[in-house]
Image (cartoon, rainbow, N blue to C red):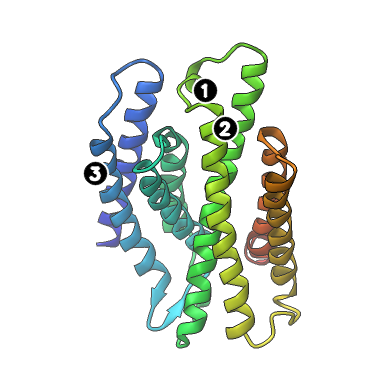
Amino acid sequence: MIIAANILAICLYLLAAGLQAAYLLNKIKQPKTSILLGIGIIAVLAHTYSAVHTIYSEQQIDLGFFRVSSLIFCCIAAINLISILRRPTSNLLVALFPLAALSIVVSSLASPVRGISVASPGLFSHILISILAYSLMTIATIQAIALALQERHLKGHHMGGILKALPPLQTMEQILFELIWIGMGLLTLSLVTGFIFIDDLFAQHLVHKTFFSILAWVIFAILLWGRHQLGWRSQTAARWTFVGFAALMLAYYGSKFVLELILS
């Protein structure tokens, strides 16, 4: 069943991304939102099934680099589908869905790592909230990249291709800060649940995660303050988003990459 779910999710992710890409390249008319949502929902459900059954078994979670990456991209795809209902963000499917499909392929080929016990509901909630926070901030970073490119091309008076199909600059900014506000809320909950349910967040094997997570929180907090008090926009907002995202990814991926892919 897991293999079948993987194949189904990959095919549907690529189909939805292909339809939207064909529209952006002026090959077809804009696909109906309901069609993209239908394809995307089935893909996400299949991806969720395979990711959960790959990671979770017998009250243990395999938090391997590639396994968690697949779950994060599953959350990213789901969040993007939800955002389509409120904002014109369907163009993000072109980038996000192929990455989600790739994450499934890599996860299915990766070797399992020793799982950790999740008998504690508190620890499980901390892990889940952290994954959701990473997912939202990843989408925010992709949004920031699109925003920065859009403004640069607008100033150069040569908008074209995919960038021409993006929503207005002001709408792009609103979407970015909505994502960051929600992501900050989840990141705050992640830190709070970590301090509550993990015995010693500053233990040697956790101190780097704690440091970079707090650093990311501070960076995003400064960005939101700058937006509210100083009116930071587009390029400035994008740069702060990139720095905050880099710190957040170092909190998890930095140590995972070294421990699992280099030292192993």
- Mark 2 is surrounded, within 10 Å at the Cα level, by few (under 14), some (14 to 19) or many (20 or more) other residues, namely many
**28 with respect to 209 (left or right):** left
- Mark 1 is surrounded, within 10 Å at the Cα level, by few (under 14), some (14 to 19) or many (20 or more) other residues, namely some
| Mark 2 residue element | helix
Q: Which mark is on residue 146?
A: 2
The residues bearing labels 1 and 2 have C-alpha atoms spaced at a distance of 8 Å
Q: In this view, does 139 lie above or below 214?
A: above
Q: Which amino acid does label 2 sit on?
A: Ala
Q: Which amino acid does label 3 sit on?
A: Gly
Look at the image and tell me whether residue 116 can be seen.
no
Quadrant of image for the C terminus: bottom right
Q: In this view, does 106 lie above or below 31?
A: below
Q: Which amino acid does label 1 sit on?
A: Leu
The residue positioned farthest toward the top in the image shown: 157
- For image coordinates 63% across by 19% down, the residue present is 153
Which of 54/238 is in front? 238
Q: Quick check: marks 1 and 2 in contact, CB under 8 Å?
A: yes
Image coords of residue 80 (percent x, y): 41, 46
Image coords of residue 87 (percent x, y): 41, 39
The residues bearing labels 3 and 2 have C-alpha atoms spaced at a distance of 25 Å
The residues bearing labels 1 and 3 have C-alpha atoms spaced at a distance of 25 Å
Which of 99/135 is in front? 135
Image coords of residue 214 (percent x, y): 71, 66
Q: Name the residue under label 3.
A: 38
- For image coordinates 37% across by 34% down, the residue present is 17
Q: Name the residue under label 1.
A: 163
Look at the image and tell me whether residue 149 can be seen.
yes
- Mark 1 vs 3, N-terminal side: 3
Number of numbered discs overlaid on the protein picture: 3
The quadrant where residue 256 appears = bottom right
| Mark 1 residue element | helix
Q: Which mark is on residue 105?
A: none
